[in-house]
Image (cartoon, helix red, strand yellow):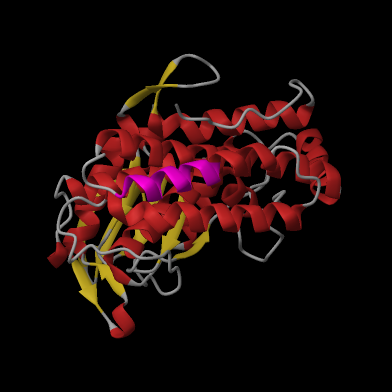
Amino acid sequence: MRHLLNTLFVLTEDAYLALENDNVVLWQEKRVLGRVPLLTLTNIVYFGYKGASPALMGACATHDIGLCFLTPQGRFLARTSGESRGNVVLRRRQYRLADDGVASCHIARDFIAGKIHNSKTVLARGLRDHALSVEQEAFQQAISNLSQAARQARNVEDKETLRGMEGNAAHSYFSVFGQLILRDKECFSFHSRVKRPPEGRVNALLSFAYTLLAHDCASALESVGLDAYVGFLHTDRAGRTSLALDLMEELRSIYADRFVLALINNRQIQADDFIEQENNCFFLTDDGKKAFLQAWQAKKREEIKHPFLGEKIPWGLVPYVQSLLLARYIRGDISEYPAFLWK
């Protein structure tokens, strides 16, 4: 449960983080904004530009406390990490699999098949619950496309084909996703997924949710001894947690996308919680980020029944459970990685 509740979010852009007597101290110029005991935390997520002291970063690394730096707009910058204490045998096995095109594709296709299946589930639930508010024929066609793609993805033998299949499935999914927005459609219109920069308010919310989910997945992977930077689908790139991006694929739609829809449809986020910049580019205000993060933490506390384990766990533990299952597969304890398949 520490992974769910003990996260310090720092939203004051010009705050500086320091370490003093085992406390995280937030400084704004010469004024102390607050103190938090370091050892009560599992993660610190900092939205700002002044940074943190080397002493604090070292202490976080020593005590396995995640320290993630983002811009005030929520774009990921970096995560601190200390000496690797993970199982060296597990990591060597991970590296060998990542370098093996066939073996890495077999793992990658589980991630993508899970993503496509869960995307289909989101649309099927939307069609069932809001049949009178959506274009039923378009939804049924998208669901049919995703069902076929999920089946085909399980048999793909090369990653380029898999990436193409994933791209086509994403196009089908996002072609009707905007119809699931039931409130304030004029302000929260959505036509397609645009990442950099996020175009429109909905894309801004999706990008922010994906950033937080990627950080959670990276922390989860490191906690079980895996290297979050060496993926099976996403290629190696300096500073990119490729395996975290792999792992979060199956969680994007049922975790992040449904969360964004709930924020809008329940009016937890309003149109004036955004700052508009050039070219229809939007970013959350400080108040908007606070509302988003409060709802995100509440979401992580909600309990669900894990489809593979058959046990009730909080949503926030799902990345950790999936990381454990992935580690068991890499070790050879189980014959296949069980993707998180939402029903």
Q: Is residue 259 magenta?
A: no
Residue 149 percent coordinates (x, y)? 61, 44
Identify the residue shown where x is 20% and y is 59%: 288
**Residue 210 vertical placement versus 77 (above, below):** above
Left or right of 174 in this view: 258: left
Camera-side residue of 86 and 58 = 86
Magenta span main SS: helix
Identify the residue shown where x is 43% and y is 69%: 194
Q: Which residues are magenta?
A: 135-146
Residue 45 percent coordinates (x, y)? 38, 53
**Residue 324 vertical placement versus 188 (above, below):** above
Q: Is residue 66 visible?
A: no
Residue 263 percent coordinates (x, y)? 23, 48
Left or right of 279 in this view: 307: right
Quadrant of the image containing the C terminus: top left
Camera-side residue of 320 and 200 = 200
Residue 330 percent coordinates (x, y)? 75, 32
Identify the residue shown where x is 32% and y is 59%: 205
Left or right of 204 in this view: 195: right
Q: Is residue 253 visible?
A: yes
Identify the residue shown where x is 16% and y is 45%: 266
